[in-house]
Each structure stands twice: as C-alpha cells, then as structure tokens.
Amino acid sequence: MRMTDLFTLFSDHWPAMMAVLAVFAVAAASPGPATLGIMATAMARGRAAGMAFAAGVQLGSFTWAMAAAIGLSAWLNTIAWGLIAMKIAGGAYLIWLAARALRSALSARPVPAAASNARSLTGHFARGALLHLTNPKAVLAWIAIVALTQTSGGGTPVLLATLGICLLIGAVVFQGYALLFASPVMVAAYRRARRAIEGVLAGVFGYAGWRLWSSA
C-alpha cells in the first residue's frame, strides 16, 4: 500500500479512531486493580518498584491486545470454559492480594524504606503482569476495542495503528501513576495513613475477586 493510500485511509477513519482512543484513555485511567496496584506499590516501595509494576501491567495489556487482534473472542465463544477458568484464576489472585493488604492493614509495624525493600524489581514486574493477565475484564476491554475499531471498516492497518496508540496511552497512564504516587508528598501521605489505605485496598481487591468468582 502506498503512503498516499495510507494517508487517505487514516484521514477517512481518524474520527472513529479518536472515539476509540478516548474510550480507552478513560478506561485506562479509571480506578481498578491495575491502577490501584501501581499506586500502592509506588507509595509503599518507591519509584523504581512502581514503574516495574506498571511495566508488568503494560506487558499484560500488550499480551491481551495482541490476543484480541488475532481472534481471542472467537476462541472464548468456542471454548466457554476458557473464560470461566480465567475468572476463577483471576478471582483467586485478587483474593490473595486482598489477604496481603489486610494483613498489612492489621500490622502495626512501620513500612520499610524503599531502598531496603527486599523484593526485586523483577518480582514487582511479575506481580503487575500476573495481575493483568488474570483479569478477564482486561481481556474483554481489548475485545471491545478491537470490535469498535473494526466497525469503522478500516481493516488491518487502522486496527494495528489504533492498538499501537492505545498501548502508548496505557504506558503513559500507568507509568505516570507510578511517578506521581512515588513523589515525596504521596509517600509521606501513605506512611501516615498506611493502615487505612491497605484496608481500602483489601476491600477493593476482595470485592473484585468475589465479583469474578460469582460471575464464573
């Protein structure tokens, strides 16, 4: 396809792409297990840990974006147990996160400094990736993005461009949260209200896990 043809294609479908991108930006920035996990990690463990967790979320997001693009929705419709298994696994992981947060909320011990945190950056990255890879809502969100893009009739070039821009938006949002909540002001606020914040996280993660299990 010539460059002039690509320019015409994107100019014709740009309004539809913008609508999809706006929907994705709002969804990515909205509070949820991934964004709350990034915030909590950044405040409790520092900038590097928060950014590593966010990078893991981005990997999970990229994985589901590619899966949706190659027809994951058709697979889920064909194999009904696939989505059920994801809901059970995702619910179990969220319940585990809730238990960890609740244990922290009930503990009176001070938060360790970020520099002395024993958890490796690889561990934070893996936690972020696992959180997103076991979240069926992330899968369904990408399936919806692909479906909305395909309704415009732009074909593969428009679909790939839209997914690429969505992933870029997600990277900016997730890493932005990590940087923002690792600021000295936010870290100080977390240390003052750690037990209350961990209690809220326990409730959010626990409720989300219960919702997944109840819908399986």
Image (spheres, rainbow, N blue to C red):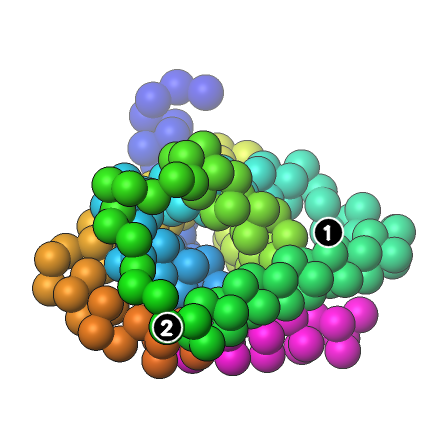
- Can residue 30 be found in the magenta stretch? no
Residue at the image position 23 percent from the left and 67 percent from the top: 191
In this rendering, the count of numbered labels is 2
- Our reading of the magenta stretch's main secondary structure is helix
Q: Which residue is mark 1?
A: 73
Residue lying farthest front?
109
Front one among 51 and 44:
44
Instruction: Classify 50 as above or below 26.
Output: above
The answer to whether 81 appears left or right of 88 in the picture is: right
Name which of mark 1 and mark 2 comes first in the sequence. Answer: 1
Location of residue 35 in the rendering, given as x and y in whole percent from the top left corner: 39, 61
Camera-nearest residue between 107 and 14: 107
Q: Which residue is mark 2?
A: 108
Indicate left or right for 36 with 179 as reference. right
Q: Amino acid at mark 2?
A: Ala
Distance between mark 1 and mark 2 Cα atoms: 46 Å
